[in-house]
Amino acid sequence: MFIHAGEYYDRADRRPATARSPVYRIGEMMQELDRSEIDDVLEGNGIGVLAVDGGSHPYPIPVAYGYESDSELFVLQLEDKPGSYKQQCLDLNPNVGFTVYEETEPGTVWRSVVLEGQLRDSSFQEAESAFATLAKHSQSAPNRVIWSNKSEDAEIRPYELEITDWAGREFVLK
């Protein structure tokens, strides 16, 4: 559904909504998540999308991450290949966005969390508690996987996202 000029429309065929079409008003189908719900989404997942400044366009990258709510420690690991486009983007601008989303009830409930902040170098020792939380709560715990063909050319490095802003939403279809 979408709204145009005050009318509700079916997204697929752009016809006015009919009696058979579910009609939702903004605010009734989407609600903000509170802090504990945001923590639940972040701790219960392990893959998200990191968006870096690619100059003329955003550069989104799916990555593994870990989050520990007690210390608000959010870490991720990136392949650090010399001269990579991702590293060039981060060197120019460490400000990033990060999105995590999940479907909690198949076909009816989706939740997402969007973070903003700056990436800074970290160490696996500093990141240990966040990665341990990820391993405890998720089936997709990260490991030190090298994706390049020449493992000597790349290194996996942990980064901490110093969060400056975050928001979460839940979308319910009923």
Image: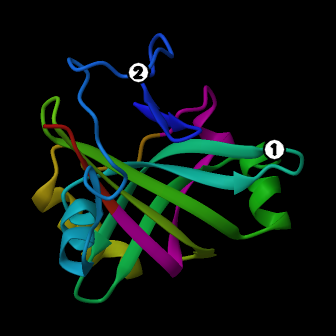
- Which residue in the protein does label 1 denote? 57
What's the coloring here?
rainbow
Which residue is pictured at 31% across the width and 70% down the height?
67
Q: Tell me how far mark 2 sits from mark 1, CA to CA.
A: 31 Å
The answer to whether 57 appears left or right of 32 in the picture is right
Q: What span is in magenta?
A: 146-168
- Marker count (numbered): 2
Quadrant where the image shows the C terminus: top left
Please state which of residues 24 and 135 is positioned toward the viewer in this rendering: 24
Residue 76, position as x, y percentages in the image: 45, 61
For residue 67, above or below residue 20: below
Q: Main secondary structure of the magenta part?
A: strand
Residue 18, position as x, y percentages in the image: 30, 18
Residue 161, position as x, y percentages in the image: 52, 74
The answer to whether 74 appears left or right of 83 in the picture is left
Task: Classify mark 1: helix, strand or loop.
Answer: loop
Q: Residue furthest right?
A: 56
For residue 147, above or below residue 153: above
Amino acid type of disc 1?
His
Q: Residues within 10 Å of mark 1 (few under 14, many from 20)?
A: few
Which residue is pictured at 69% across the width and 70% down the height?
95
Residue 30, position as x, y percentages in the image: 30, 54
Decide whether residue 69 is among the magenta residues.
no
Which residue is pictured at 33% across the width and 64% down the height?
66
Residue 10, label in figure:
2
